[in-house]
Image (tube, helix red, strand yellow):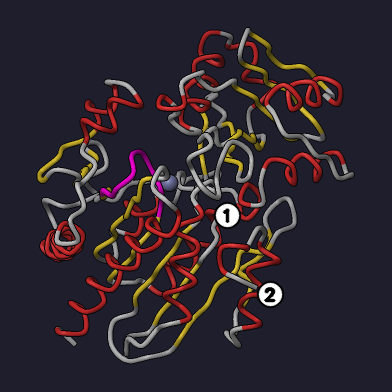
Amino acid sequence: MELFEIRTVRDVMQWLDEQNIPYSSLGDTAMGDPILAIEKPGEGAPVMITAGAHAGEPAGVFAALSILRDWTCKNPLVMVPLRDPFGFQGYEACLSHALKRPVRFETHAELWAMLKDNADALIYEDGDFLLVEIADILFTNLLPPADIALYAGPRTVEQRVNRTLKEHPELVAKTAGKRIVFPSNAGPVAENVWDFYRAFSAEITEAGIVADMNRRFGGDDEPNEVRYLRALCDRVQPPVVLDLHEGQGSSYYFFVPDYFGNRQIEKYTNIMHETLKNQGEQVTTLQDVENRLGGHIRESFDEPLPGVLVDKGLSSPQKDSGFSTYAGRYGAAITVETGRWAPLEKRVRLHLLAASALLDEMGKNG
Ligand SMILES: [Zn+2]
């Protein structure tokens, strides 16, 4: 199986089998998909590499698997290559799972009709936005902007769900604790993501807020996707964690929980940043991200270097946090973002360049 043809966690397992790479399952998600882990022994500090927390971000998954296949670093490796297998398989497969029969659709209009025809409950409908429940799973559709240059990905759906639940608090009781599926709404340019090829999955918290599989680490209500990875992280206590994502733009940027308090993080981030810059890449800045997602983004982040985003509120490990913030209690945990509007090959290559720069640096220091 070719790397870029992988659609599902079963495909990942087949690919690993073909590469003769042993793996285990940390446990199943509530939907019955395994969370895979690979552990390669070695000497020195273990490196943890994770990807696919947000299911519509396949470049990180493909990069992680490439790193695994080509691993020559002497350090032990601990990898969770696909943190949200349910959403990764795409919107049709998520909906087929709920309906217990295969469904196909091509357009937002077809999805809209299919959701309404098959809904156990119509939760909310307003112009371009639809929220229904099917077999205990919430499904949404949000019509994307007419101009493909304005596509901003699934975060715009998240913003719409959060706003809807805030404006209609009576809907919180109907939705809290449930899985929710969004279209990726990344448009025709976002190879291997598009609008439906990958879905985005999350849960609605008791407070009525969308919480994806990269949140709630160490909290009281971790979904299995979070609990198993958090337990692995607690066992390994990795001094270095790379979490691979895809975000805005068509280049790269970093989320770093503790840039100011941890010299190791600062050093590793700067080395990855320099390496990508030396490839002639123009970093995606906080201003670029704000242009797509809105001004509230700026309130949450410092930007010590262009494209290095440091969460103001989460600069120390705390309860109920994102994965890299949680993992930061054990060492340098860095989130690498490549822009989902670059060609897939480039998105993967940027991840590989960043990772190899970090691993080379670790190798120098033993
Ligand atoms: Zn992400």
Q: Where is residue 220 in the image (x, y as percent from the top left)?
A: 52, 45
Q: Nearer the viewer, residue 17 or 233?
A: 17
Q: Which of marks 2 and 1 is in front?
A: 2
Amino acid identity at mark 2 = Gln
Crowd class of label 1 (few under 14; some 14 to 19; many from 20; radius 10 Å):
many
Asked if residue 300 lies left or right of residue 216, the reply is left
Which quadrant holds residue 24?
bottom right
Q: Which mark is residue 63?
A: none
In this view, 124 is above or below 236: above
Q: SS class of the residue under badge 2?
A: helix
Label 2 sits on residue: 14
Q: Position of residue 112 (x, y in %)?
A: 73, 22
Q: SS class of the residue under badge 1?
A: helix
Label 1 sits on residue: 225
Q: Nearer the viewer, residue 284 or 362?
A: 284
Amino acid identity at mark 1 = Glu
- Residue beneath the point at 20% across and 46% down: 283
Q: Where is residue 328 in the image (x, y as percent from the top left)?
A: 28, 58
Asked if residue 104 lies left or right of residue 67, the reply is right
Rendered-image quadrant of the N terminus: bottom right
Which quadrant holds residue 309?
top left
Are discs 2 and 1 less than 8 Å apart at CB? no
Q: Which stretch is magenta?
A: 245-253
